[in-house]
Amino acid sequence: MIMRASSRLPRPRRARLTAVTWAAVALAGLMGLGACAPFKLEPPPGFAEVQDYERNTRMKAGDNVGLSVRVFDNVRGGTLAYWAEDLVTKLGARGYQLTAQKLVKSKNGEPGTRFDFDYQAPGEDIKKFYSAVLFVTDRYRIVLQVAGDAEHNGRYLSRIDGIVAELKVGGCKLGSKICGGAQPPPLKTPPPPAPESDGEDTPSEDSPPPDNAPADAVSQDANVAAPQG
Amino acid sequence: MTIHPHKRRLRSAGPWLALLALSLVAPACAKAGKTMSMAPDAPAADPSYARGDYGGEAQMGGMPMEADGSYDMDEMADMEAMEEMPAEPAPPPTVTASVGTPASGPASTNDIPQQQPGFGGLQKEGANFKAKAKPERHEPEGAKDTRDVTKKSGGSEAKPGDEATTTDEPKDLGRQIIYTAEMTISVFKVEEAMKKVEVATIAAGGYIQQMSEGYYVLRLPAPALRGVMDDVGGLGVVESRSLQARDVTEEFVDLQSRIRVLRETREQLLALLKRAHSVKEALEVRQALDAVTMELEVALGRLRMLENLIGFSTLTLHISERGPHTSIPSSNDPFPWVDSLGVESTEWK
């Protein structure tokens, strides 16, 4: 059709248009190929790449703090709110304590949600910090994770937003309702098990709130940001 | 004396029958001024032998060879009555004599067919007598001893005759079950977890049967098995857990019965050994005694092993180290993606 329209033009101008057209097609193709990559992230300062797979990239800092990006296929109906709740619920069942929830944005402007957790492995005395940043696009669920000993959390938690800002996520379609979708509501994890008392039933001030406590009770303590977007 | 047709069957009883006949008839004949040769096919039998009524005590391995010649002609009269026993079965009498107790008086023909199972070659003798009566079931003293053995974890052998109380019905021993469990857990620090496993095992009264890096075979008191499994599961993430129960009640009861019978048999053989009158007799009895003793020891060993397996459950434990390669298995989750997320899959060591 393009050729047919350009056939009425003079030959030099027609040739120039044809070249531009093919260049545009090639560029679009390259852009399209690039868009197929689920994510792109250069190792942040202080991290070295240990493993680079298309759907699982792992990096390591000198103090054994790990950074990884995992990619999972999205399914129809899978939104950021849905997967965020799934993530927090299941991690909470494994003993993770949600301490913070906030909106973040990727390098290409895709909104995601960051969850910060405290974690103490069963049978272990050392506490860990764990942050998971979740992006959901039409094609993918992308999770950027940072974890390490709790003693290092002050050094890394402040850097996570900057690391996320360097992350490009893909998988959005034109006119997508998934990409740029609504943020999840404030989520919470089950309270940690109460320490064994000496037989007294009176709860201490540090005891966790009961299960029927208002939802914002934990959110306020956990410094959970209000949902945005 | 003519040989009746039913006596020919007695010829197949073998040397034991002859030994028995000699032990009874020879002293009596000696007392009567007669002599008797050791014919292997002597058509006679001692009713008290088949019934298991023996007097006196004998030490295992002893070789009493003296012949006191205290038998009188009453026993000979019993022998004569035996030979003239009718072929048709007589009405079942009431048998009150207990097996394994000392003789309480002269034996009657009605007391004869108390056959002792597991009696080895001597059992054939009782078969030749054709059971005429259905004896009452008397639990021998060895049975109680066997039960006492089962209550002791060590399984030490009880001496017959320690407790003479008998019951008509065997006690209900309940179900005898061997529990075998297997667990696989993953932890961050294997060495620390192994130390905690050892502490939990010893605290529960168990012991370590086998150990290697990240692998344990633990023997735990059966009531403590579940508690220890819960404690071990708390050390990390439980990858798998299984528990098997094997019911060995039938084998257990069979072994107890077998031991009881073997003990009775041994007692009877010891008594017979004491009454042997020649080296040949003593050797033959001794051979049978050795066989019974060996069989008894094998049964006791098996019983002790069963008691150990029942009392102490086996827990096989595999401990693996968690790391970025480890994922947490989920049950029926259609979206198990979170299983591969978390500190374990992110942090490096």
Image (cartoon, coloured by chain):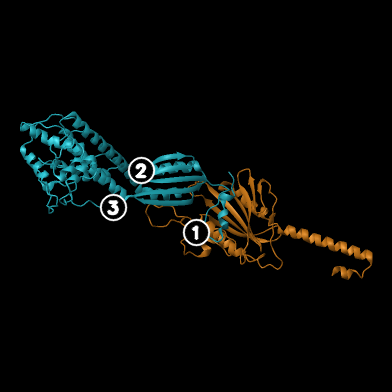
Chain colours: A orange, B cyan
Q: Nearer the viewer, residue B192 or B326?
A: B326
Q: In this rendering, would A38 be left or right of B118?
A: right
Horizontal placement of B103 versus B343: left or right? left
Q: Is residue B253 left or right of residue B108?
A: right
**Local crowd size for mark 2, using a 10 Å CA cut-off: few (<14), some (14–19), many (≥20):** few
The quarter holding residue A3 reads: bottom right
- Pointer 2 residue: B205
Amino acid carrying label 1: it is Pro
Callout 3 touching callout 1 (CB < 8 Å): no
> Can residue B162 be seen from the camera position used here?
no
**What subunit carries mark 1?**
A
Report which residue position mark 3 lands on: B174
> Could you classify mark 1 by the number of other residues whose Cα lies within 10 Å: few (under 14), some (14-19), or many (20 or more)?
many
Q: Are marks 2 and 3 in contact (CB under 8 Å)?
A: no
B72 vs B274, nearest the viewer: B72
Q: Which quadrant of the structure image shows residue A170? A: bottom right
Secondary structure of the residue carrying numbered label 3 = loop
On the rendered image, what quadrant is the C terminus of chain B found in?
top right
Q: Are marks 2 and 1 in contact (CB under 8 Å)?
A: no
Distance, label 2 to label 3, CA atoms, is 23 Å
Q: Is residue A55 left or right of residue A204?
A: right
Instruction: Tell me the residue that label 1 is attached to.
Output: A190
Which percent across, then down, holds residue A25?
81, 62
Whole-angstrom CA distance, mark 3 to mark 1, is 45 Å
